[in-house]
Amino acid sequence: MNIVINGIGVAGPALAYWLMKSGHEVVLVEEAPRLRGGGYIIDFWGIGYDIAEKMGLIGAIRRLGLGDPSDFAAGLIRLCLYFGGNLARTSWTALFRSLEAASVLMAPGAVPRQINSLLSLW
Ligand SMILES: Cc1cc2nc3c(=O)[nH]c(=O)nc-3n(C[C@H](O)[C@H](O)[C@H](O)COP(=O)(O)OP(=O)(O)OC[C@H]3O[C@@H](n4cnc5c(N)ncnc54)[C@H](O)[C@@H]3O)c2cc1C
């Protein structure tokens, strides 16, 4: 099947990877003049981390990582309801200890760039 995906953020190229792997023709379209570069650091973890692992990208992503979340001093994480009130609270250390090693701090464009470099090999 011929498929067009709008957006070269992180989801578009990851979806393109899996569609191409199962034999589809994919064209990625991006409205921005260039791929996103700067921005504040992000935590890379959860389902995105698991998928990157399945794509064989975790080694490269960890090498580009800016550190482990436990390297950073932070206090309480509070989940708030939209109209006020606390939903839950936990400590930064407890949260990231529960993730074990499956978490890394990244520059925002670093993960999409790794996926794109994987796609250019196809
Ligand atoms: C302040 C902030 C902090 C965040 N921190 C974290 C974090 O620490 N950890 C984490 O995992 N997530 C974080 N997120 C969430 C994360 O940024 C998003 O989940 C992720 O970027 C979603 O990826 P995406 O590819 O779906 O969308 P995007 O990354 O937004 O990419 C969409 C792309 O599509 C392009 N586009 C849009 N419309 C069109 C169109 N019509 N035609 C062509 N191109 C189009 C856009 O230009 C863009 O390049 C944060 C988000 C914000 C706003």
Image: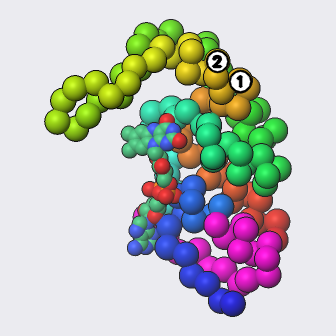
Residue shown at 73% from the left, 26% from the top: 101
The amino acid type, in three-letter code, at marker 2 is Arg
- Residue 12 vs 50, above or below: the answer is below
For residue 100, the mark is 1
Judged left or right of residue 64, residue 31 is left
**Residue 82 at x, y = what percent?**
22, 38
Residue 8 image-quadrant placement: bottom right
- Say if the magenta span includes residue 8: no
Marks 1 and 2: in contact by CB < 8 Å? yes
Query: From the Cβ of disc 1, is ligand 1 less than 8 Å away?
Result: no
Residue shown at 26% from the left, 34% from the top: 81
**Residue 79 at x, y = what percent?**
35, 28
Q: Tell me the quarter of the image containing the C terminus.
A: bottom right
For the residue pair 109 and 80, the one nearer the viewer reads as: 80
Residue shown at 74% from the left, 33% from the top: 62
The amino acid type, in three-letter code, at marker 1 is Glu
Query: What residue is disc 2 on?
Result: 97
Residue shown at 69% from the left, 90% from the top: 1
